[in-house]
Image: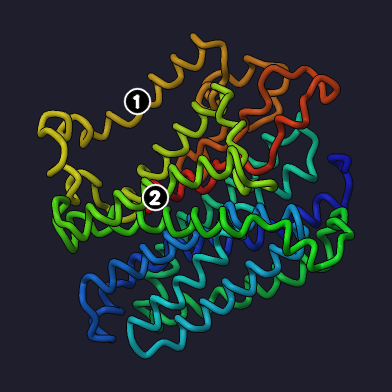
Amino acid sequence: IEEGDEQLVLAFASLSVISLAAALDATSLSVALSVMAAELNSTTVEAFWSGTSFLVTSTVFQPFYVSLSDIFGRKQLILVALLHFTAGSLIAALAKNFSTILVGRSFQGVGAGGIISLTEVIITDMVPLRDRGKWFGYISGMWAIGSVSGPIVGGAFTQKASWRWIFWMNLPVIGVGYFMIILFLKLHPASSLPLMRKFRQVDWLGALLFSASLTSVLIPISWGGVMYPWSHALTLVPLILGLGGLIVFTVYELHVAREPMVRFSIFKNWTLRLVYLQTTIHGVILWDDDRKISAFRFGLSSTIKNRLAQQLELPSSYPQFLRAVQKLSSRSGTLGSSNLVSNPSSRPHTANAPPATTRYGDPMDVSNIDDYDSDDDYDYEKDDPRHPDAWQRNIFET
């Protein structure tokens, strides 16, 4: 699709609308938790899980959505994600207790996982390599708008009307986005294979191993130091089992799966490793800032020597760490996303990408821009849209 193509602009507008809805929902609830807890007579732990359940399900389902979209089609799967998000919003808006809200937030997380991952993949499908950084920057801009305005909108609804409007407001935005996707997102159809054959192509065992193992890791990390001490069996046992399960999943994907859900070959590239490392740190920064909580004051410091924890608690430690990654990138001859921001003229194609500092300084996945002077030189096998940029961030957000 050519950059000036009206079809591209309309398709991109539809993706921007649903990204805005997901960003608003991700941050708007935090300011209303105390009011919700008082009205529904819930505990602090239940209020805590209303945010965590969203992040856990969003993280777990992101790679599965992308894998399914390879088989059934991007457009079909993003519409399914929107239906999940809508169902979750309705459940939460009508909830009479916090247990129902947790169910709704989980459904919203499933939908948001699809929105986040498939938006990035669809842009990769639609936009030529040399222009990709710019379009990712625009999507990050929508996330910045939603992330910043979410707490303001949520606080206004909570104070002037009801916290339930935080969920009701999703419906018109998602509704507009849904019909825009149907009308304007024109993608090549998926494989014409029979439906049953497509189902047989799905990496069901890999999806089960990944979902169960990652959930088993994320949940004890979430409640460690909050509900249970880090040394408690209910924290350590699922954490160890989950890590073991992820090892089994990796071996299975590398040596057994015919259509692997995650292609680990992408981790062989040092540029990608550094970009993913920065995205991981970004997840910690974003949600620590959103919740006004330091991860180390929240319980992790009990497992780390005090001196190290004190250093990590300093606000300056984050930029210092990212600067270290930048230096490593330049010395190793590779390009991480922060290097792209600080030196936008370092490569022929990087000038096309606006500073990737939106969405609270989101280090977007622009790693494939490096080392190619034209699309003709580009190795499309390397341009796998399954890059785990988004869900790596979500793992540490959780």
Residue drawn at 17 percent across, 55 percent down: 225
Q: Residues within 10 Å of mark 1 (few under 14, many from 20)?
A: few
User: Which residue is depicted at the point 36% across and 57% down?
Assistant: 216
Residue count near mark 2 (Cα–Cα under 10 Å), binned few <14, some 14–19, many ≥20: many
In this rendering, would 195 be left or right of 262?
A: right
The picture places residue 297, in percent across and down from the top left corner, at 17, 47
What secondary structure is marked by label 1?
A: helix
The N terminus sits in image quarter: top right
Q: Name the amino acid, label 1.
A: Phe
Where residue 336 appears, as percent x and y from the top left, is 53, 24
- The disc, 1 or 2, on the residue closer to the chain's N-terminal end is 1
- In the rendered structure, which amino acid carries the disc numbered 2? Glu
Q: Is residue 243 above or below residue 368?
A: below
Alpha-carbon span between mark 1 and mark 2: 18 Å
- Which mark, residue 397? 2
Q: Is residue 393 above or below residue 398?
A: above
Asked which quadrant contains residue 305, the reply is top left
Give me the disc on residue 393.
Answer: none
Residue in the picture at 44% in, 14% down? 327
Position of 324 with respect to 60 (left or right) is left
